[in-house]
Image (tube, rainbow, N blue to C red):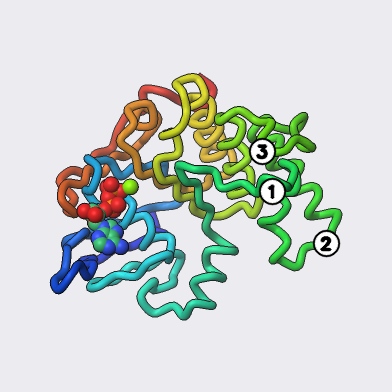
Amino acid sequence: MESIIQIEKLTKRFPVGTGEFTALKDINLAFGKGEFTGFVGPSGSGKTTLLNIIGSLDTPTEGEVTVLGHSIAHLTHRQSAKLRNQHLGFIFQTYNLFPVYTVYENVEFALLLQQMPAAERRKAVLDALEWVGLTDKAHSRPAQLSGGEGQRVAIARAMVKRPAIMLADEPTANLDSKNSHHILQTMAQLNKELKTTFLFATHDEKVMAYLRRIISLEDGRVVKDEAMTPQRQPGV
Ligand SMILES: Nc1ncnc2c1ncn2[C@@H]1O[C@H](COP(=O)(O)OP(=O)(O)O)[C@@H](O)[C@H]1O
Ligand SMILES: [Mg+2]
């Protein structure tokens, strides 16, 4: 399968005090379209750093990271912003919704930077709300939602542009078990129907149960890369 993300000899060091801290060490990985994959490992193992570099929010110290044909180290700010805006979706532990905007407006906001005709934009927002089961909450504001619903709005906001790649950093960390499974079902369904590639950073076993590939990190190194038979499937 042709890969849409390639990582070769990636090392990431952060300056700390007068020295440096090596957060990622000699990572080599490739990802194909439609994967449902997680980076797992203890806190501090480098999961977020790796996801941020793939998402062009940070850059490699050494090595080459290519996302959809773009070399992350060589993008200008403008080019990396364009890559994120057009092709990448992000979900974080905290949903970061605009409190004064409605659910509909929070999702629509992601499209306002793009030159999209109003009717097309409206359809895209309504589709995204339907994917996450929040059509009837379109006019609610974030404070009126449960945590699970808030995260579903964040998924809709990230998915409304139909990105090729979704990056989800600890997306279930603030959710109870029922809501965690609900959003994982939603993401697994979107992966199946739209062929969106999902990459997770997580140490939540509930997330792992859905993954088809688990990459284990320890102290910034890949220590295991396994194909999985998911214990949970979309719709089950
Ligand atoms: N900007 C930074 N400056 C210095 N150290 C950092 C920075 N970002 C992350 N680190 C360090 O890199 C290591 C990996 O962090 P992170 O990728 O956040 O791990 P994880 O997401 O697996 O918990 C940690 O030891 C963290 O303290
Ligand atoms: Mg992290």
What residue would you read off at disc 3? 142
Q: Is residue 9 left or right of residue 91?
A: left
Using the numbered discs, state the Cα–Cα distance from disc 3 to disc 1 in whole angstroms. 9 Å
The local secondary structure at tag 3 comes to: helix
**Dot 1 surroundings within 10 Å: few (below 14), some, or many (20 or more)?**
many
What residue would you read off at disc 2? 117
Q: Residue at x 42, y 66 (%)?
A: 56
The local secondary structure at tag 1 comes to: helix
Dot 2 or dot 3: first in sequence order is 2
Dot 3 or dot 1: first in sequence order is 1
What residue would you read off at disc 1? 106
Q: Which quadrant would residue 213 be assigned to in this image? A: top left
Does residue 4 sit above or below 134 in this rendering?
below
Viewer-proximal residue among 9 and 35: 9
Using the numbered discs, state the Cα–Cα distance from disc 1 to disc 2 in whole angstroms. 18 Å
Name the mark nearer the viewer: 2 or 3.
3
Relative image position of residue 34 (x, y in whole percent): 46, 46
